[in-house]
Amino acid sequence: MTRLIRAEILKLKRPGMLVMVALLSVGVVAGYYGVTAAMGNDQHFDDIVAILALSGSVIGVIVGATAGAADIEAGVFRDLVATGRSRLSLFFVRVPGAWAIVLPPLVVSVVGAALLSGGDDVGLALAQVSAAGALAAAVCVGLAALTGSRGTVIGLALAFQLGVSPMLGQWEAIGDGRFAIPQVALARLGGADDIGLAVAAAVAILMAWAAVALAAGAWRSATQEI
């Protein structure tokens, strides 16, 4: 299993992918503090954490979708199955493979931002940002395996993350139903006290999103014709 995970990481370590991840993590922190310093504006740790949570979701979407559909799009899934490896093993190793690309730069970015601003609640910030990246990656691994299309999943997931999810999270007409929106649960993990949701419930909601998407992807991987 460890060997399979390493293989997944190597497949994702493309120069373009690594540059994208660096720009949306460390680059975001450098840009935020550079611009605010140049303009003489106040620097707030909470602001950069919110930005990193959003960019972490974007990173997770792109890396997760790539991990989930790369073998299918390249036409090598048949060859991997022919080696005798379990289809489910071939599917599930994509998740830690994607996390290995997504999470380290996000952790470094949060710690770096805390050092630059002297931010408090670093633990909460790490929880929110890491969970945002990990959730997006896991969900998109599952959806990409289900659809067999990286581009479609990236487009739909980014539209949901950047447009639909924030709108639903602000829509009071749906009442407590908005607690099921990932961004609301992530904000609660980050210490938002104005959200009437227990931390344990927020964790359960995020895990449910990942579980449903991964179950769909696993089913497709186990049953698709090759």
Image (cartoon, rainbow, N blue to C red):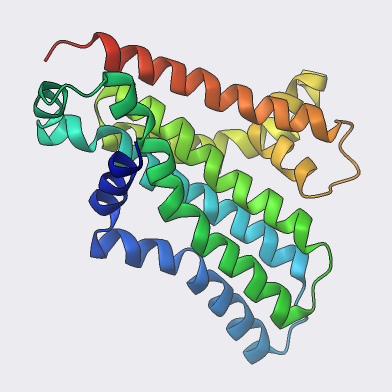
Identify the residue shown where x is 41% and y is 61%: 21
The image position of residue 210, as x and y in percent, is 54, 27
Residue found at x 37% / y 18%: 218
**Left or right placement of residue 167 versus residue 225 in this view:** right
Q: Position of residue 30 (x, y in %)?
A: 55, 79
Image x and y of residue 138, in percent:
47, 35
Residue located 69% across and 49% down the image:
128
Query: Does 2 sit above or below residue 141?
Result: below
Lateral position of residue 29 relative to residue 205, left or right = left
The N terminus appears in which quarter of the rendering? Answer: top left
Residue 80 located left or right of residue 209: left
Residue 27, percent from left and from top: 48, 73
Residue 186, quarter of picture: top right
Q: Residue 19 lies in what quarter of the image?
A: bottom left
Count the labels in the image: 0
- Indicate the quadrant where residue 41 lies: bottom right
Which is more toward the observer, 45 or 214? Answer: 214
Where does the C terminus fall, quadrant-wise? Answer: top left
- Residues 185 and 108: in front is 108
Closest to the observer: 20 or 38?
A: 20
Residue located 72% across and 90% down the image: 40
